[in-house]
Amino acid sequence: MKKQILYSLFVVALLFSFSSCEKNDKVSEELKDTFVADNYDITEVDITMRDGIKLHTTIFSPKDKSQKYPILLQRTPYNASPYRRGELRKTIGPNVNLMKEGNIIVYQDVRGRWMSEGVYDNMRAYIPNKKENESDETSDTYDTIDWLVKNVENNNGRVGTWGISYPGHYATVSAIDAHPALKAASPQACIGDFYFDDFHHNGAFLLSYFRAIALFGTYKDTPTDTAWYSLPSLNTQDQYQFFLDKGPLKNLNTYFQYDKLDNTSPKNPERIDDFFWKEIVEHPNYDSVWQSKGIIQHMDKVPSSVATMIVGGWFDAEDLYGPLETYKGIEKHGKENYNTMVFGPWDHGAWARRRGTNIVGNYYFGDSISEFFQDKIETKFFNHFLKGDGSKESGLPEALVYDSGKRTWSEFDSWPPKNVTTKTMYLSPNQELSSGKKSSEGIKFISDIKRPVPYSEDIKTVFTPRKYMTDDQRFAARRPDVLVFETDVLTEDLTLAGDILAKLKVATTGTAADWIVKVIDVHPADAKNDEKNKNMQNHLKMSNYHLMVRSEVMRGRFRNSFSKPEPFKPNKKTEVDIKLQDVFHTFKKGHKLQIQVQSTWFPLIDLNPQTYVDNIFKADKKDFKTQTHTVFTDSSIEFSVLNN
């Protein structure tokens, strides 16, 4: 148990490094480790919410009292330490520039986490038209800001919020029914809807996130400065084999039966003590529980008085849906709002680091990309709205996006860009991705539940998967249960800018199936390894590298409705549409555009029984059966193509 607690603390530190203030991997070269202690006073307070619950808050105020400063607030489930121990952070704030320039920087434990009172609700539902003393995260944020501007000395009356991942979600929340003092919010890698972000993708469960569940679902009702949860240990370095051996999802319930609860009675394999795991198990469909937790449905409540800058990474395995839909939601409803988006070639939270080279997994995208964002974009955004005149003439583009194929930044006055057209390509016979439909014949493959397609060729166990987003897909292309379709070598550049819609026509001998579509940039045979890429695994070469540009799954039962699942009729040709998230990527002259289609992606997502059951989380071993699937060659992919 002690080892598990220590590991839990390590994981919190890992998550915290992406979501909070540990921004600068080279900070020791630029600043003293004592910069925060030398230049900031620290105060820890408990702020009372309208319903009487107290939220623990840590305030860093510049020691220089000769001027007034704006307040930069992050609300987090990860912890707002140092908890009166004098263990100051080495960096604070969104980036090192804003820390050095001087701002009042505030961290708060959200309700039910760490030193704050109350009981935590994972993605607590927004309550419109709240009654007196009724609370949600918007009111907790409002009450916090109200207290800060009235009680923190030397503040200039302007507040900004920011955060990455979960804290990014709370930054989004801050902009809804916002306090008048809130002038700028930057949700980054923000969760938008829990049925499509993080733990679910289009109804499929992200099994690879299994170990993270206890972090958010272990009950506590009293403040603590010590981890109250422990994470399950797999006791193996081979997660593929671990989950394959475990079998049905119900066999994982025992990992969520906690020692502190009734441990004297005989073990009940169906007992679940973790409230988040229980929520997932009992609500497999997009019902009122998940619908109520979605925040992107409330972007019409972001007032024009709050400027927003949405930030995300094109290769963020955890939260890509959220920031894209948050930006689009504000654009749709807030015609008078200042709303901008920044998307770069980053994995989860990488824009908050300063490592010089920008590498995701095995793939190198360029130099000083994150530094450019922090120095020229993020700092400018907050300074303009918190210290400057706050006009809509910020000098920043509406959409600043990085072309992950050309490896260059581009600016647009809308996203997707106005000069985009839809190009339809077909999954034709002989592995051809063609511009016209050539036939409607079926291509069959066997989906063996004992040999599911791995999402990575690595033998590993991870806390949450990230590297796979740019993995070389040759290992998958060479399996018989992965269908491959590709163009001829391109004679000119092809730039995709926007979303991608796969319109599959399929059949199965069973009554249930998942469908996965991957968009891949096949590099030429003479492509050379980049000398700056020190991360590339030794067995790989850029020659013929199959870069995964985008991928997505659709749990087939939800093909018509996420709320009302339905089985397939065996051997009946059926339409399944899969919306893939936006890309900005140029397939360069000499490359090829490839599509891969498969039905398993293990253990990134859980294994579909391939026979229909009401609740896959309660399926039995006997329900899992190998089936033969068919993809028809009148299936198509609709790309958003940027016109020159």
Image (cartoon, helix red, strand yellow):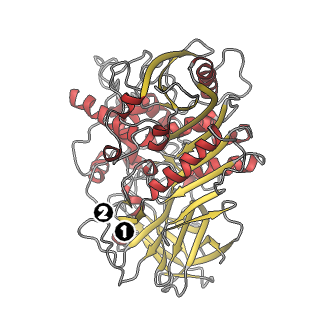
Residue 413 sits in which quadrant? bottom right
**Residue in the image at 73% along x and 45% along y:** 337
Residue 168 numbered mark, or none: none
Instruction: Identify which residue, 62 or 500, lies in the foreground.
Output: 62
Between discs 1 and 2, the one toward the N terminus: 2
Amino acid type of the residue tagged 2 in the rendering = Glu
Query: Where is 40 relative to 376, above or below?
Result: above
**Side (left or right) of 559 relative to 222:** right
Residue 8 sits in which quadrant? top left
Locate the C terminus and report the quarter of the image it occupies: bottom right
Q: Which percent across, then down, holds residue 549?
A: 48, 66
**Side (left or right) of 413 relative to 94:** right
What element does badge 1 sit on?
loop
Q: Distance between the residues labelled 1 and 2?
A: 9 Å
Instruction: Identify which residue, 619 or 21, lies in the foreground.
Output: 21
Q: Which percent across, then down, holds residue 146?
A: 64, 21
**Residue in the image at 61% along x and 82% along y:** 435
**Side (left or right) of 37 relative to 398:** left
What element does badge 2 sit on?
loop
Which residue is disc 2 drawn over? 457
Which residue is disc 1 drawn over? 472
Query: Where is 16 relative to 558, above or below?
Result: above
Q: Are marks 1 and 2 in contact (CB under 8 Å)?
A: yes
Q: Which percent across, then down, holds residue 551?
A: 49, 62
Locate the N terminus and report the quarter of the image it occupies: top left
Query: Is residue 287 visible to us here?
Result: no
